[in-house]
Amino acid sequence: METYIDVYANTDGVNISDIYNKLLKMGLKPAVGNHDFVREWEGIVSIGQVIEFADKVQNELRGSGAFLKFTSDR
């Protein structure tokens, strides 16, 4: 299972390179194609685990001005 994150930067927020580096430190991988980052899960995970992960990303980027979109796919 994979969870994709699309990042929309705000011109009044931090530099996109700061957001990029924070997401890399969280173990996310840059994605090529329709999404910006991907979290590759081992096996199938529950919606609760995906929400917990999304909360962590949101907390890490709090105050950055970034807007996020999460999409999970099996």
Image: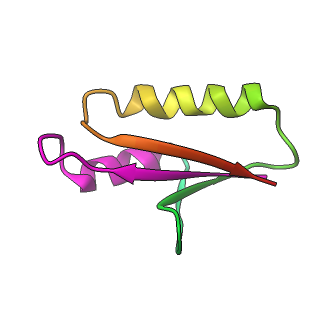
Q: Nearer the viewer, residue 60 or 3?
A: 3
Which image quadrant is residue 38 in? bottom right
Q: Position of residue 41 (x, y in %)?
A: 75, 49
User: Residue at the location (74% across, 25% down)?
Assistant: 48
Q: Which residues are magenta?
A: 1-26
Residue 31, position in %: x, y? 53, 67
Residue 55 sits inside the magenta stretch: no
Number of numbered discs visible in the structure rendering: 0
Asked if residue 46 is positioned above or below residue 10 in the image, the reply reads above
Identify the residue shown where x is 64% and y is 25%: 52
Say left or right for 30 vs 61. Answer: right
Q: Nearer the viewer, residue 36 or 24?
A: 36
Which residue occupies the extreme right position in the image? 43
Q: Residue furthest bottom?
A: 33
Q: Specify whether 27 is left or right of 15.
A: right
Q: How is the image coloured?
A: rainbow
Q: Quadrant of the C terminus?
A: bottom right
Residue 7 is one of the magenta-drawn residues: yes
What's the residue at 42%, 25% (across, down)?
Answer: 59
Eyeballing the image, is 73 above or below 68?
A: below
Residue 58 sits in quarter:
top left
In the rendered view, does 31 fall on the left or right side of 41? Answer: left
Q: Position of residue 5 (x, y in %)?
A: 52, 50
The residue depicted at 39 percent of the width and 51 percent of the height is 7
